[in-house]
Image (cartoon, rainbow, N blue to C red):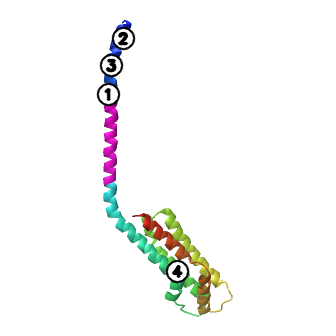
């Protein structure tokens, strides 16, 4: 084959290679666009179904945080005897029971939010235990000490509640 024939062959092949490459590029763009559109529509449909469930989970966790907030907890759970240790255990058990009741809600929220809620629960229990270590002699006095301690500091429930509200705001 002479160099003229090779050049002619190359001249005939070049337009078809360029046309094939352009066709491949546009076909790939179209396929990716369609895949993205389908994914968006699926996400939109699933969002329509899951958003109410997620909001309900956040609502339940807000209720949990409100119920374990020290002022509402101490008012709602009255001591059954004068024994301060029994009252401390009752408050702790009430918090743990509330938490166990809402344990499944974690699948609908972010890990960070769930960890903050768990930290609020633990911090609340720690505050109760710290107040119980004082020289109080009755459950009623322990109740007062727990309330006095929460008046001085920000409630762990309030901190977690503000984070939950922020996260729910990001859902929109």
The reply to whether the C-beta atoms of the residues labelled 4 and 2 are less than 8 Å apart is no
Dot 4 alpha-carbon crowd within 10 angstroms: few under 14, some 14 to 19, many 20 or more: many
Residue drawn at point x = 58 percent, y = 89 percent: 143
Which element carries disc 4, helix, strand or loop? loop
- Which residue is label 3 attached to? 13
Q: CA distance from mark 4 to mark 2?
A: 86 Å
Residue 39 belongs to magenta span: yes
Q: Residues within 10 Å of mark 1 (few under 14, many from 20)?
A: few
* Residue at mark 2: 6
Vertical side of 137 occupied by 109: above or below = above
Is 157 in the magenta?
Answer: no
Q: Which mark is residue 20?
A: 1
Local SS, label 3? helix
**Residue 132 x/y as whole percent:** 63, 84
Give the quarter of the image for residue 120: bottom right
**Residue extent of the magenta highlight:** 21-41
Q: CA distance from mark 3 to mark 4?
A: 78 Å
Q: Nearer the viewer, mark 4 or mark 2?
A: 2
Q: How many marks?
A: 4
Name the residue located 56 percent from the left edge and 70 percent from the top edge.
Answer: 119
From the image, tell me which residue sits under label 4: 69
The residue at 65%/92% (across/down) is 137
């Amino acid at each position: 084959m002479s160099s003229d024939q090779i050049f002619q062959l190359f001249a005939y092949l070049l337009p078809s290679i360029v046309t094939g490459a352009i066709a491949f590029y546009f076909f790939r763009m179209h396929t990716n666009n369609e895949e993205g559109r389908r994914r968006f529509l699926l996400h939109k449909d699933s969002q329509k179904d899951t958003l109410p469930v997620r909001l309900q989970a956040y609502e339940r966790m807000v209720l949990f945080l409100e119920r374990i907030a020290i002022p509402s907890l101490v008012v709602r759970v009255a001591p059954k005897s004068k024994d301060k240790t029994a009252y401390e255990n009752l408050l702790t058990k009430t918090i743990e029971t509330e938490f166990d009741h809402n344990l499944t809600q974690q699948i609908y929220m972010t890990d960070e939010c769930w960890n903050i809620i768990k930290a609020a629960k633990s911090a609340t229990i720690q505050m109760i235990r710290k107040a119980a270590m004082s020289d109080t002699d009755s459950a009623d006095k322990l109740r007062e000490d727990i309330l006095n301690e929460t008046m001085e500091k920000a409630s762990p429930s309030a901190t977690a509640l503000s984070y939950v509200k922020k996260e729910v705001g990001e859902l929109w």
